[in-house]
Image (cartoon, helix red, strand yellow):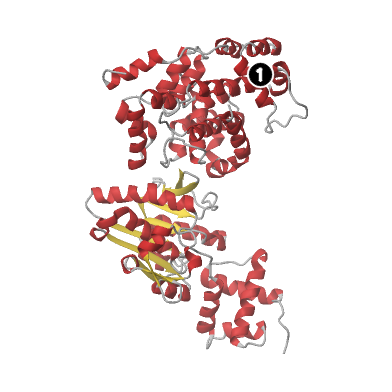
């Protein structure tokens, strides 16, 4: 890629791969609350790679189903539409952005561990704080940081600098990105979700998870939930959350937005709440292992 | 000779109250067995016949000071080691120390005061000293750094001043650290090097004595790890109040990995680091 740094970043938008295979249809179905299991199954079944993934996930130890699942329709029925769709989409996205052999890249295992943790916490928090829509929060969590992989792929040398700066000066990743690139990974995540015609909510969560104040009024709450989940995943040390800076959670925009929604949160013992998240450990590592095997 | 027996309820209460009055530490029914075991050790060492006569000597003005001191030394021994609680050590090394150093350096003061409260034999105080040395490297001598290691246990304070430790105390310390900051002694122990020793001042002070604690005001960092757990709620409140008064506005307070300030003191705000927490002062309400 040639041109100034700014030009090269803008160019990423053009070079983003088109939405893969049956994704587009799956996404359409996600918009729809009353989608039929059979319709969804038929869509997935048209894509061999995705079909294999769905069956593999359904038969994994994580779900512990008593009998072997042999058809996509059976898998979808057992595991729930949204859950399986989310995981499939994340797997497919991971496959698309997998680095070519010999190409230098960020630690993918650490990346996906963080993304899965964010997804699981997003669902836990949206449940805890009674915020909807929980399933979209889960999918948003899985894909929120995809912009990092994209930046690493298209501008590897510069992104290496960003990561180094984050560690050397112990500053938040986003600050380092702005300083070196003039753009944050959130924006890039948003670009991808736009290009793939994912629900606008997902795109907004992607682009605003580090800038909750910039989210629209109607979506700010769910954006805040995923933002807080992102922080929690980072602070629990799941994979690579970007940086190791400390944070006063109750001073974050995300927390304040959620507190407005749930005023009793003021009394909440944040420390204990986050420490309690240990109960999600097993889920998070199992899901990431499942994704890793693709 | 009477066989060893456990403390009667009356004896336990008498000892418990004596210790509480001197130290703020309160032995509950749950850790009664600990007190029991320690008293029996004292009885063996003293050649005392039974707990009843021992308690008499504690309360007798002629022998009270000596026996009281010996008892306090016995019951305030805590398990401590170098580089304890890795997530906290990481937070100190990566977040807190660089931040404090940057701030103090900015205004040219180059002064850092740290309070290791309930420091026992000094492993924690020396650990912080090492972290500071690792951060500042050759610049260390350009800084005016004091780490106050306070405790009420005189044996522990003396051990701190001596600065010689068994290998077990260094089990969590990275190899390079041992090489760089310790000297091996002839009997297989490790002696803290002079540069590190010079940063630590061991002093006797009771955390429940607010007057004594006033000496440690204006500190940038307070470490109060696994100390509060021994205190009653009232004593905890008093100690945290001392910490609040002694800590600089932008300073940090570290408690033990599983301790929390909530419910006891609402003057601190929680700072979350990767896998651990610390506290900063909330500004006073006017």
Quarter of the image holding residue A10? top left
Q: Residue at x 61, y 72 (%)?
A: B16
Q: Is residue B92 left or right of residue B64?
A: left
- The residue sitting at the right extreme is A67
Q: Is residue A215 visible?
A: no
* Closer-to-camera residue (B132/B38): B132
Q: Chain of mark 1?
A: A
Residue B141 drawn above or below residue B273: below
Q: Is residue B127 left or right of residue A198?
A: left
Q: Position of residue A136 (x, y in %)?
A: 57, 21
Q: Residue at x 36, y 64 (%)?
A: B181
Q: Residue at x 62, y 84 (%)?
A: B44
Q: How many marks?
A: 1
Q: Secondary structure at mark 1?
A: helix
Residue A181 drawn above or below residue A236: above
- The residue sitting at the left extreme is B108
Q: Position of residue B153 (x, y in %)?
A: 48, 73
* Closer-to-camera residue (A285/A235): A285
- The residue sitting at the front extreme is A102
Q: Which residue is mark 1?
A: A81
Residue B261 drawn above or below residue B179: above
* Closer-to-camera residue (A223/B207): A223
């Amino acid at each position: 890629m040639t041109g100034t740094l700014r030009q090269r970043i803008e160019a990423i938008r053009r070079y983003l791969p088109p939405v893969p295979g049956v994704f587009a249809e799956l996404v359409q179905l996600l918009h729809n609350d009353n989608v039929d299991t059979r319709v969804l199954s038929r869509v997935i079944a048209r894509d061999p790679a995705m079909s294999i993934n769905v069956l593999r996930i359904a038969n994994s130890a994580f779900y512990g189903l008593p009998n072997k699942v042999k058809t996509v329709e059976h898998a979808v029925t057992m595991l729930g539409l949204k859950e399986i769709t989310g995981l499939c989409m994340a797997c497919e996205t991971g496959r698309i952005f997998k680095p070519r052999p010999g190409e230098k890249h960020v630690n993918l295992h650490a990346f996906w561990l963080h993304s899965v943790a964010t997804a699981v916490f997003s669902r836990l928090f949206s449940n805890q704080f009674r915020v909807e829509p929980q399933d979209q929060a889960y999918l948003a969590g899985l894909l929120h940081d995809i912009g990092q992989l994209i930046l690493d792929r298209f501008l590897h040398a510069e992104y290496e600098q960003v990561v180094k700066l984050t560690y050397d000066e112990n500053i938040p990743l986003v600050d380092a990105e702005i300083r070196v690139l003039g753009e944050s990974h959130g924006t890039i995540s948003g670009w991808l979700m736009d290009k793939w015609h994912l629900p606008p909510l997902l795109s907004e969560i992607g682009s605003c998870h580090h800038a909750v104040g910039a989210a629209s009024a109607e979506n700010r709450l769910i954006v805040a939930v995923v933002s807080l989940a992102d922080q929690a995943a980072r602070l629990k040390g799941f994979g690579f959350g970007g940086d190791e800076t400390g944070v006063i959670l109750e001073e974050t925009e995300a927390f304040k937005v959620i507190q407005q929604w749930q005023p009793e949160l003021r009394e909440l013992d944040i420390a204990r709440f986050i420490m309690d998240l240990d109960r999600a450990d097993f889920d998070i590592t199992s899901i990431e292992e499942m994704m890793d095997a693709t | 000779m009477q066989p060893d027996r456990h403390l009667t309820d009356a004896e336990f209460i008498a000892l418990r109250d004596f210790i509480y009055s001197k130290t703020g530490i309160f032995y509950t029914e749950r850790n009664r067995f600990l007190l029991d075991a320690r008293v029996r050790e004292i009885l063996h060492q003293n050649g005392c016949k039974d707990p009843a006569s021992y308690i008499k000597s504690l309360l007798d003005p002629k022998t009270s000071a000596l026996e009281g001191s010996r008892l306090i030394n016995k019951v305030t021994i805590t398990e401590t080691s170098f580089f304890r609680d890795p997530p906290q050590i990481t937070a100190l090394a990566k977040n807190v120390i660089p931040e404090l150093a940057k701030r103090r350096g900015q205004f040219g003061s180059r002064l850092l005061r740290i309070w290791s409260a309930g420091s026992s034999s000094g492993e924690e105080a020396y650990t912080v000293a090492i972290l500071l040395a690792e951060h500042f490297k050759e610049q260390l001598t350009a800084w005016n750094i004091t780490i106050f290691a306070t405790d009420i246990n005189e044996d522990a304070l003396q051990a701190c001043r001596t600065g010689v430790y068994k290998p077990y105390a260094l089990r969590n310390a990275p190899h390079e650290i041992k090489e760089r900051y310790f000297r091996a002694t002839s009997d297989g122990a490790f002696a803290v090097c002079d540069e590190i020793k010079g940063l630590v001042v061991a002093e006797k002070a009771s955390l429940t004595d607010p007057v004594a604690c006033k000496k440690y005001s204006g500190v940038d960092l307070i470490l109060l790890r696994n100390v509060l757990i021994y205190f009653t709620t009232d004593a905890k409140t008093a100690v945290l109040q001392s910490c609040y008064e002694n800590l600089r506005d932008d300073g940090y307070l570290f408690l033990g990995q599983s301790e929390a300030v909530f419910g006891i003191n609402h003057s601190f705000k929680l700072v979350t680091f990767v896998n651990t927490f610390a506290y900063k002062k909330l500004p006073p309400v006017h």
